[in-house]
């Protein structure tokens, strides 16, 4: 069923594992970070710059591309790889996240493009979800079958079954009913996938169940029991960091360890270390490229300012006369070329280059982080690496 | 006086000449195009990308940098080269162009940054020009001495004497008086330059005189008779292409042929060919990078659409399904990676990458144009080259 794909665990320490995920567009060394090219473009960054920064895999969002320019258009252009000029591995999500996370009223910064505003979730039916497009306001129905068909058109290597992204504020009864419906939707996604399988794509199932141990276990077993290539941990992960780690553990501990495990939407440095220790193989998050557009540059512990975040805000006046690079030990093109003072100036002067330059650093930063995490697993000194990065 | 600079004419055909302009930051093969990094950044393009596209020299505008962040700030950061990360040759203008061209009521697209709007030219005095800053509305006086001091702080290799950029709608009497004042200002610029000469910069004089043959001749002789390193042709060049060529010829034919000749603010393909034939060695214009931000991609004659401009507008719906690169024979990173259809989509989706990608193409295009012009002069087949590019 997945003859052009493979996931090999090379070595592991406790639950952390070093692996290789083989795709038709190249191998992905895991643990890996997947960068967001929401609308078929990592904002302001050329594919060549992504590659040079050590990126292995990027994603695009089905919801956005479905709204505009439409999946048929991208299919007719030869699919996402050919369309975007990115010839490495790629993932698309199911489209559900945007509809549900926004429809359920939580915050997402991802949909801030032209004619923006949120899509409106009109209703959830057994067949699928009815919503209004952010692009033209039209009413649309997204079903499991349609999500798979769209993802077939887009042509990413890794694709995801359609599910409901359950909110934190749902009660257990709602979360359980939603999970059961997600399981029915995921089975329909799998049926649609089998019908059109040409071995160019691999399908991930999604583990739901909110913050409830028994539901997460049930959902992990559902995914294990169906022929998905990999498992993604989705839905609400709770209201605190500690609860997030508990929920990830609830799911990860139950999942089939021969398959790759992806954690949806998480990209904090300490979160990644914790999740790797729980057995997670890949991550995606808009955070590194999104904060770049607001002047946020990721830095290791020793390079942080007093604010105590995992990034520094280059708009702050203290960087006006700071002639050092974002990080002196960073080999990215931005750190090799620009000072913090220049990036501060570019941000103040509203110069485009600031956004691309900080994004290039943040991308290289995440790739260096993942490289060192892999080295740490291989060498058995992940804890020491962690101290440096946190 | 200019011991770290040299201009050597290698060969010439009729009045066209092939030269090398030596600066402390590298040699510039002429005829050359100078790209606009108005506010100390070529918008959306990394220095590495500029270099890879074959760029030899860029400029920044004294007026903008004087307004923000101030020349002292850039001096304290080590000067423009260190500040911007561009280690090739650089030019700054005198600051007069923006004050006068905008103050006199003509159009400029260059000043469209944050808190934009035009500077207001308050008055022209013998001492200098009084204007209001576009950045903070403060009233400022720019004098020849101050312009040179600012350009010393900025630290570009090539700098320009302070003059009045005379408008087309001035009558001959005004144009003559203005030219005489410009000559006095240029002499003061030269005196200030001599006082602070540390051999790191070379000063260009500016030829004024509007569209009047006798005034252009007089002004060219003024520049020849003073120890400027090079001559720049400035001020109004008339109201039509034909008049522009006439005015350039009036000045160029009189100028000392041992010095480099720069034509200020001109960057059209056919204009460059005509001016090269009249002996011009370098050009600058915001056009190639400015049109990129509006979807305009420069193309040779054979690749143009029906509109008859020197560029195609990738926003036009005809490019929605055009799977070819901007130019199939272009070796730039954009043409090697992206199709017209993808760039069209990025523009429609308001994705940042479009602007950088088209700018990279336009920069490579201008550098290829200049490379072929130099080859055409060397080989004696400039006319054939011209047919291909026009």
Image: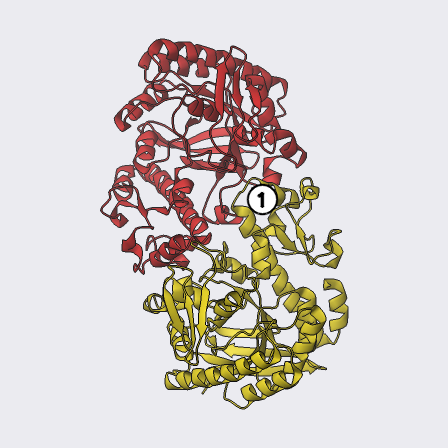
Chain colours: A red, B yellow
Q: Nearer the viewer, residue B152 or A9?
A: B152
How far across and how far down the image is residue A248, in percent? 34, 23
Structural crowding at the residue carrying mark 1, measured as other residues with C-alpha within 10 Å and reported as few (<14), some (14–19) or many (≥20): some
Give left or right: position of B146 versus A52. left
The residue at the far bottom in this view is B225
Q: For the C terminus of chain A, which image quadrant?
A: top left
Q: Nearer the viewer, residue B205 or B377?
A: B205
* Residue A232 appearing in the image: no
- Quadrant of residue B63 within the rendered picture: bottom left
Give left or right: position of B340 versus A297. right
Q: Name the residue beneath numbered marker 1.
A: B347
- Where A10 sits versus A292, above or below? above
Give left or right: position of B198 versus A316. right
* Residue A246 appearing in the image: yes
How far across and how far down the image is residue A303, in percent? 27, 50
**Residue at position x 63%, y 60% in the image:** B365
- Quadrant of residue A144 within the rendered picture: top right
- Where A157 sits versus B239, above or below? above
**Residue at position x 68%, y 79% in the image:** B249
Q: For the N terminus of chain A, which image quadrant?
A: top right
Q: Nearer the viewer, residue B366 or A255?
A: B366
Q: How many marks?
A: 1
How far across and how far down the image is residue A281, in percent? 40, 31
Q: Identify the secondary structure beneath mark 1.
A: helix
Q: Nearer the viewer, residue B148 or A156?
A: B148
- Where B26 sits versus A33, above or below? below
Tell me the subunit letter for badge 1. B
How far across and how far down the image is residue A26, in percent? 54, 38
């Amino acid at each position: 069923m997945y003859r052009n794909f493979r996931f090999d665990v090379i070595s592991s320490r406790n639950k952390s594992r070093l692996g290789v995920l083989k795709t038709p567009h190249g191998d992905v060394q895991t643990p890996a970070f997947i960068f967001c090219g929401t609308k078929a473009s990592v904002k302001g960054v050329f594919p060549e710059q992504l590659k040079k920064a050590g990126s292995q895999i990027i994603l695009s969002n089905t919801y956005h591309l479905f709204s505009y320019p439409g999946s048929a258009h991208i299919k007719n252009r030869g699919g996402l790889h050919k369309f975007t000029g990115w010839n490495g591995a790629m993932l698309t999500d199911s489209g559900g996240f945007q509809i549900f996370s926004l429809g359920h009223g939580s915050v997402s910064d991802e949909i801030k493009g032209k004619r923006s505003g949120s899509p409106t979730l009109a209703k959830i039916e057994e067949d699928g979800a009815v919503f209004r497009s952010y692009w033209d306001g039209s009413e649309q129905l997204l079903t499991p079958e349609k999500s798979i068909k769209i993802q077939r058109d887009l042509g990413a290597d890794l694709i995801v079954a359609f599910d409901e992204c359950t909110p934190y504020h749902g009660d257990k009864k709602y979360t359980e009913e939603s999970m059961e419906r997600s399981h029915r939707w995921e089975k329909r996604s799998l049926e649609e996938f089998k019908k059109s399988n040409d071995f160019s794509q691999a399908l991930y199932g999604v583990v739901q169940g909110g913050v409830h141990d028994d539901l997460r276990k049930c959902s992990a077993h559902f995914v294990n029991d169906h022929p998905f290539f990999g498992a993604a941990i989705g839905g609400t992960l709770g209201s605190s960091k500690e609860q997030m780690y508990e929920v990830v553990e609830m799911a990860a501990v139950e999942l089939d360890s021969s398959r790759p495990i992806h954690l949806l939407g998480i990209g904090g440095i300490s979160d990644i270390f914790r999740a790797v220790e729980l057995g997670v193989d890949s991550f995606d998050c808009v955070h590194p490229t999104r904060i770049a557009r607001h002047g946020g540059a990721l830095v290791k512990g020793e390079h942080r300012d007093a604010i105590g975040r995992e990034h520094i805000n280059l708009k702050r006046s203290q960087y006006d006369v700071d002639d050092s690079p974002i990080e002196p030990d960073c080999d990215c093109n931005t750190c090799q070329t620009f000072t913090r003072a220049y990036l501060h100036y570019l941000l103040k002067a509203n110069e485009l280059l600031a956004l691309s330059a900080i994004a290039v650093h943040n991308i290289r930063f995440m790739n260096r982080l993942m490289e060192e995490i892999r080295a740490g697993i291989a060498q058995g000194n992940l804890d020491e690496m962690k101290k440096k990065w946190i």
